[in-house]
Image (cartoon, rainbow, N blue to C red):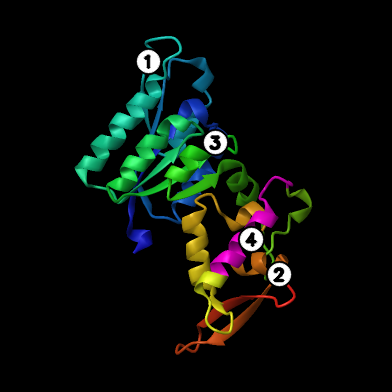
């Protein structure tokens, strides 16, 4: 099961602010159990001083890596070496790489080649190459902005007035949804919503309903005004299955 998956969380202190740590660990708990938590940096550097109390509070192991040469990122190398050691130990089923640095693109790809589940987390400046190399990618700004929000009963964020225009290209999302629905629908045009969501996540690793101000996929799709959603009873009295269809006037 997904929640039984053991995950190694490896954080690049040079590219991540300590203000995100709570949201990072809260989010990774949705993907598995963080059994290894390490953060890499030159802890003699005053720039990283703010991290020290955070490490104690969240039981994260700091890995010291001196900057031997100006202009060379020794921290990246240390993180990559540790990741490969952890991979070969066969003690985890997944990795969470926290950085906005494209230098970890090959690492993410290599871990996935080995059958690992790889979640990336970084700021919106993260290069697409690294995002695409991960199975899932979460934007730290989005995690932080939704971490303390409440959601109404229909799953819509109560903080919509503060949404940013750059939190997702809705036109691109609509076209992607239409393509997936056409590919997976029955003769009447209905597609199982769970399958649509699965294919959407595979094709777009950085897709997250929270990027668009919604907690769940169903209210997000309804907000786009381009689709119909139908609830159907299952064999279990307390479980309904949801199906989605492109509106005929679209």
Determine which residue is flagged by label 1. 66
Question: How many neighbours does mark 2 have within 10 angstroms: few (below 14), some (14-19), or many (20 or more)?
Answer: some
Question: How many neighbours does mark 4 have within 10 angstroms: few (below 14), some (14-19), or many (20 or more)?
Answer: few
Q: Earlier in the sequence, mark 2 or mark 4?
A: 4
How far, Cα to Cα, is label 4 from label 3?
Answer: 24 Å
Determine which residue is flagged by label 4. 175
Query: What x and y, as percent, mark residue 190?
Result: 57, 80
Vertical position of residue 218 compared to residue 210: above or below: below
Residue at horizontal 29 percent and vertical 32 percent from the top? 82
Pointers 1 and 4 in contact (C-beta within 8 Å) = no
From the image, state whether disc 2 or disc 4 is nearer to you.
Answer: 4
Magenta stretch mostly in which secondary structure?
Answer: helix
Pointers 4 and 3 in contact (C-beta within 8 Å) = no
Question: How many neighbours does mark 3 have within 10 angstroms: few (below 14), some (14-19), or many (20 or more)?
Answer: some
Please state the extent of the stretch shown in magenta in the rendering: 164-181
Determine which residue is flagged by label 3. 126
Query: What x and y, as percent, mark residue 81?
Result: 29, 30
From the image, state whether disc 4 or disc 3 is nearer to you.
Answer: 4
Determine which residue is flagged by label 2. 226
Query: Is 178 included in the stretch rendered in magenta?
Result: yes
Which quadrant is home to the C terminus?
bottom right
Residue at horizontal 57 percent and vertical 42 percent from the top? 140
């Amino acid at each position: 099961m997904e929640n039984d998956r053991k995950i190694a969380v490896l954080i690049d202190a040079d590219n991540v602010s300590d203000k995100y740590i709570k949201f990072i660990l809260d989010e990774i708990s949705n993907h598995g159990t963080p059994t290894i938590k390490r953060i890499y940096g030159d802890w003699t550097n005053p720039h990283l001083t703010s991290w020290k109390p955070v490490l104690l509070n969240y039981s994260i192991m700091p890995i010291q890596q001196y900057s031997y040469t100006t202009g060379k990122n020794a921290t990246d190398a240390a993180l990559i070496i540790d990741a490969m050691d952890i991979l070969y130990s066969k003690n985890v089923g997944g990795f969470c790489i926290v950085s906005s640095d494209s230098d970890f693109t090959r690492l993410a790809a290599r871990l996935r080649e080995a059958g690992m589940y790889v979640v990336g987390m970084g700021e919106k400046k993260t290069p697409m190459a690294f995002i695409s190399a991960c199975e899932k990618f979460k934007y730290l700004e989005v995690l932080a902005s939704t971490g303390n929000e409440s959601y109404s009963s229909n799953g819509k964020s109560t903080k919509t007035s503060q949404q940013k225009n750059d939190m997702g290209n809705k036109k691109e999302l609509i076209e992607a949804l239409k393509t997936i629905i056409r590919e997976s629908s029955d003769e009447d045009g209905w597609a199982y919503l769970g399958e649509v969501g699965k294919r959407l996540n595979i094709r777009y690793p950085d897709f997250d309903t929270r990027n668009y101000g919604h907690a769940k996929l169903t209210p997000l799709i309804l907000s786009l005004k381009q689709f119909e959603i139908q609830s159907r009873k299952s064999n279990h009295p307390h479980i309904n299955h949801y199906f989605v269809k492109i509106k005929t006037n679209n």
